[in-house]
């Protein structure tokens, strides 16, 4: 029995060997798997548009980034995948978007740098006039630019595809700044490529392919959605953009500012036209570290508000010692730990200064030391024939209030100082003594006449 069973097992084993022998030379392999890769970095611009005569403010812009929505393939366009986001609780740890900071003294590009004949800028920045495809830089305006970095190095991609991210600006509280609700959509293109130096030829890459960048940036307004951004049938976004959606180089903000013009007028028959008065200007609700130009004279630019004052107060008998030889500052700097400034200016009759570029919503207060003059707020219409500069002051008389909690326009204000005295006429001075002498003589004659009569 054991011998017969052994023979049967041997025969079965032989049959099995014969059955698999045709495949004996075939090499088996595991399923193909990509080696995952990490993202790289890209950048976008932050533009800040402001008046030509204003200083760049101290302001920092922050951003958040989130995964975009999935968009199925349609009409031959490529599908879009939600961007891969790494979180620690509710905090996105990857990708990261750097903040950008503007400050006084930053380089700016002015509208005057644009050559309308050649349609090019006189500077090397070709994106200046048409930031984000729109003519936002107009006459009397300039812009400053900073660059934000988007770091995808903490994100791992394991399959080819278009991965979509949405970047939003974080609204802040800087004075005069209009925070944008526009968003940037960044599509990350992860592609398959053939590495001829490797047996496992197919690999992933985030790199330029067909001369097109792997990061395609578009801008959308609040009335649009990322799903409206075309992906095209090739690497890179398509060109069929709708209203409110466009290719972009970044986000644009505006800095709204106003000018404060402070003047002095003197009237009255005892008033001194060459006397220097001290006027103190206090401005609050500012950004720490901001700087403001103060115009003391016409700069021959019709697009700016100018002053008409001396750089230094003079010395004369009418001006008290404390107001003589005092400098009128042409640059005001807010301390880094403050949100206001207070500065005193010294003005004669008909002079005024222009503080340029104060942010929208600033609070201003103007006071003065009128000494022994009667002080009246504003400058009266009856004095509008003074040498005010009609081209720039906007009003014949400086008739705005000397204080306001919310600056929403250019302000023209100041004080009229009046000093009058009653002067006796010359007739009174010459006649009165003679009358007195005549009266005394007449009284003496009467006394003598009475005595004589009694003596008789």
Image: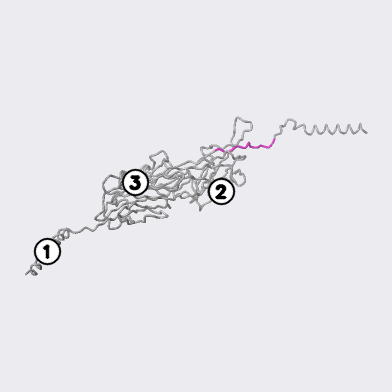
Q: Which one is closest to the eye, mark 2 or mark 3?
A: 3
Would residue 80 appear left or right of 357 to someone viewing this image?
right
The residue sitting at the right extreme is: 1
Q: Nearer the viewer, residue 262 or 301?
A: 262
Whether residue 341 is visible here, answered yes or no, is: yes
Residue indicated by mark 2: 75
Residue at mark 1 to residue at mark 3: CA–CA distance: 74 Å
Q: Which residues are magenta?
A: 30-40
Task: Please identify the quadrant where the C terminus is shown.
Answer: bottom left
Q: Earlier in the sequence, mark 1 or mark 3?
A: 3
Helix or strand or loop: what does disc 3 sit on?
strand
Residue at mark 1 to residue at mark 2: CA–CA distance: 130 Å
Residue indicated by mark 3: 295
Q: What label sits on residue 389 in the rendered view?
A: none
Q: Nearer the viewer, residue 254 or 13?
A: 254
Residue indicated by mark 1: 444
Q: Earlier in the sequence, mark 1 or mark 2?
A: 2
Q: Which one is closest to the eye, mark 1 or mark 3?
A: 1
The residue sitting at the left extreme is: 456
Would residue 176 appear left or right of 266 to someone viewing this image?
right
């Amino acid at each position: 029995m054991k011998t017969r069973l052994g023979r049967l097992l041997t025969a079965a084993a032989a049959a099995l060997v014969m059955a698999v022998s045709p495949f004996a030379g075939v090499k088996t392999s595991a399923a193909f798997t990509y080696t995952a890769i990490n993202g790289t970095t890209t950048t976008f611009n932050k533009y800040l548009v402001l008046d030509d005569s204003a200083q760049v403010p101290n302001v920092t812009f922050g951003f958040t980034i989130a995964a975009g929505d999935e968009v199925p393939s349609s009409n031959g366009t490529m599908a879009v995948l939600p961007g891969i986001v790494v979180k620690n609780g509710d905090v996105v740890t990857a990708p990261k978007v750097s903040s950008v900071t503007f400050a006084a003294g930053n380089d700016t590009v002015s509208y005057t740098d644009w050559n309308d004949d050649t349609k090019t800028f006189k500077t090397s920045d070709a994106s200046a006039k048409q930031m984000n495809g729109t003519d936002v830089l107009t006459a009397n305006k300039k812009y400053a630019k900073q660059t934000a970095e988007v770091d995808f190095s903490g994100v791992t991609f394991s399959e080819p595809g278009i991965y979509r991210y949405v970047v939003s600006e974080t609204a802040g509280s800087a004075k005069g700044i209009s925070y944008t609700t526009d968003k940037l959509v960044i599509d990350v293109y992860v592609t398959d490529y053939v590495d001829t130096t490797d047996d496992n030829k197919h690999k992933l890459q985030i790199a330029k392919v067909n001369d097109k960048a792997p990061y395609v940036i578009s801008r959308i307004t609040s009335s649009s959605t990322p799903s409206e951004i075309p992906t095209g049938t090739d690497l890179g976004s398509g060109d069929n953009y709708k209203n409110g959606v466009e290719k972009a180089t970044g986000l644009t903000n505006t800095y709204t500012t106003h000018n404060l013009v402070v003047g002095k007028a003197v009237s009255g028959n005892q008033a001194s036209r060459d006397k220097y008065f001290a006027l103190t200007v206090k401005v609050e609700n500012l950004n720490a570290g901001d700087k403001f130009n103060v115009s003391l004279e016409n700069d021959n630019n019709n697009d700016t508000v100018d002053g008409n004052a001396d750089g230094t107060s003079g010395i004369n008998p009418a001006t008290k010692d404390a107001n003589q030889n005092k400098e009128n500052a042409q640059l005001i700097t807010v301390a880094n730990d403050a949100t206001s400034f207070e500065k005193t200016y010294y003005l004669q009759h008909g002079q005024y200064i222009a503080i340029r570029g104060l942010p929208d919503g600033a609070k201003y207060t103007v006071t003065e030391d009128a000494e022994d003059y009667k002080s009246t707020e504003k400058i009266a219409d009856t004095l509008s024939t003074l040498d005010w500069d009609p081209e720039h002051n906007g009003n014949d008389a400086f008739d705005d209030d000397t204080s306001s909690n919310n600056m929403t326009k250019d302000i023209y204000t100041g004080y009229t100082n009046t000093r009058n005295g009653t002067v006796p006429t010359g007739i009174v001075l010459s006649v009165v003594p003679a009358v007195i002498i005549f009266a005394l003589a007449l009284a003496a004659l009467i006394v003598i006449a009475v005595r004589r009569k009694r003596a008789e």
